[in-house]
Image (tube, helix red, strand yellow):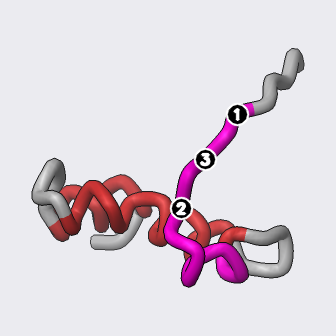
């Protein structure tokens, strides 16, 4: 599998939660948060993307 690097811009307060120590679910939820906050996606759609019913 070919891998690539990406750069993410997250609020300073969330930096600690995006590190390798956190679970994948928490990390993905934090990455979705800006889209929820600016109403790009709904809470329901975010839950679907995270695999939560």
Query: Measured from the top left, where is residue 33 in percent x and y?
Result: 35, 67
Query: Measured from the top left, where is residue 37 in percent x and y?
Result: 21, 67
Left or right for 45, reference 7: left
Query: Measured from the top left, where is residue 50 in percent x and y?
Result: 42, 62
* Depicted 4 relative to depicted 24: above or below: above
Query: Measured from the top left, where is residue 19 in percent x and y?
Result: 78, 71
Q: Which residue is mark 1?
A: 6
- Foreground residue, 13 or 18? 13
Segment tinted magenta in the rendering: 6-17
Q: Which residue is mark 2?
A: 10
Q: What secondary structure is marked by label 2?
A: loop
Report which quarter residue 38 is drawn in.
bottom left
Foreground label between 2 and 1: 2
Q: Which residue is mark 3?
A: 8
* Spatial separation of the CA atoms under disc 2 and disc 3: 6 Å
Which mark is on residue 49? none
- Foreground residue, 3 or 16? 16
């Amino acid at each position: 599998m070919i891998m690539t690097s990406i750069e993410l811009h997250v609020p300073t307060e969330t930096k600690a939660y995006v590190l390798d120590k956190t679970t994948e679910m928490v990390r993905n939820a934090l990455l979705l948060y800006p889209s929820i906050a600016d109403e790009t996606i709904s809470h329901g759609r975010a839950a679907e993307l995270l695999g939560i019913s």
